[in-house]
Image (cartoon, helix red, strand yellow):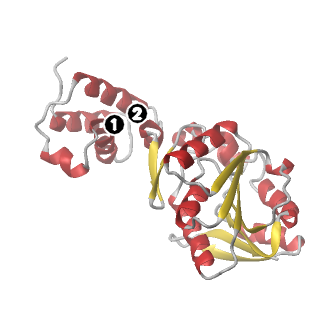
Amino acid sequence: MECFTIKEAFKFGIDFLKIHNIEAPDINTEMLLCWILDLSRIEIRLKSNEIITQNQQKRFIEALESRSNHKPLQYIIGKIDFYNITLNINESVLIPRPETEELVQIIANNIRTSNNIHNILDIGTGSGCISIALGNEFPNIKIDGIDISLAAIECANDNKNSLNITNVNFINTDFADYKSDKKYDIIVSNPPYISIDDYNKLDKELFFEPKVALTDNNDGLNFYRLIAKKSNEFLNQNGKIFLECGINQSKKIISIFSKNKYEAQIIKDFSGIDRFVIVSM
């Protein structure tokens, strides 16, 4: 088969993804071409008449086929930009969302207004996105990230090492079994908060992500109950807990923590949704 020019590849990709009902086929095609050709968006246009190699064309078509089967773009490319860093990701970890970047920003703002933050615990660290983003910005703070998935911990360590982050430690453990003599000034978690009923109605793309990172196989609140129950073992007296949650969950989460004698407040995300719960002793 004769090789495409970049312009021809771009048109082919858009038409192919349109046939398979993939949203934003132009953006998807452009990102795949940028990745495979190692070019910027501007370079793709400036070099539109250049011919791509046979190997590049083969990889491009394979990537289009994966995308047409609803495999998320981030998993195909294997990287994602998150809070001023670039992370490697794969299907063993959740794809970091913009809302989680907002959570990191909220924590970062809190750290800047306090002179007494030394240790952070990140529960369900996944790719390590929260731990590494905070570790990168605050190199003097020690951060422990835990996850029940060994594959997730391997991904997180890969990210830590590739970014030369030295103040973050990842541990393969279930929070229910986690034991430590250390006390933390901040506990953060973006736990599996999708109920099993809602999980079964998710878009096709989300089924590529690890089920254990999305749902607790119950009402979506199990991990908040566990964190509320166990956090007094690990939280310093003036410490805070920062949590991400789903739509219509925040008031239920506040009730869970209130029963455990915590105070809590809700913060909305950029879309105006009650997305974050901040808990204090």
Percent across and percent down for residue 120 are: 70, 64
Circle 1 crowding by C-alpha within 10 Å: few under 14, some 14–19, many from 20? many
Cα–Cα span, label 2 and label 1: 6 Å
What amino acid is found at the position of numbered circle 2 in the picture? Ser
Vertical placement of residue 11 versus 161, above or below: above
The correct choice, above or below, for 239 with respect to 73 in the image is below
For residue 112, the mark is none
* Relative depth, front residue between 273 and 61: 61
Q: Is residue 216 left or right of residue 63?
A: right
Secondary structure under tag 2 reads helix
Q: Is label 2 in contact with label 1 (beta carbons under 8 Å)?
A: yes
Q: Is residue 78 left or right of residue 191?
A: left
> Residue at position x 21%, y 26% from top?
53
Work out which quarter of the rendered image holds the N terminus and state it: top left
Disc number placed over residue 68 in the picture, else none: 2
Most foreground residue, 96 or 268: 96
At 88% from the left and 62% from the top, the residue drawn is 229
Residue 17 place in picture, x, y as percent:
33, 36
Instruction: Indicate the amino acid at tag 1.
Output: Leu
Residue 22: tell me if it is visible.
yes
With respect to residue 222, does 105 lie above or below? below
Which residue is identified by label 1?
Answer: 17
Q: Of all residues shown, which one is farthest toward the left?
A: 49
Q: Residue at x 66, y 47 (%)?
A: 214
- Neighbor class of circle 2 (other Cα within 10 Å; few <14, some 14-19, many 20+) is some
N-terminal label among 2 and 1: 1
Residue 255 image-quadrant placement: bottom right
Q: Is residue 179 left or right of residue 155?
A: right
Q: Quadrant of residue 5?
A: top left
Percent x, y of residue 80:
45, 49
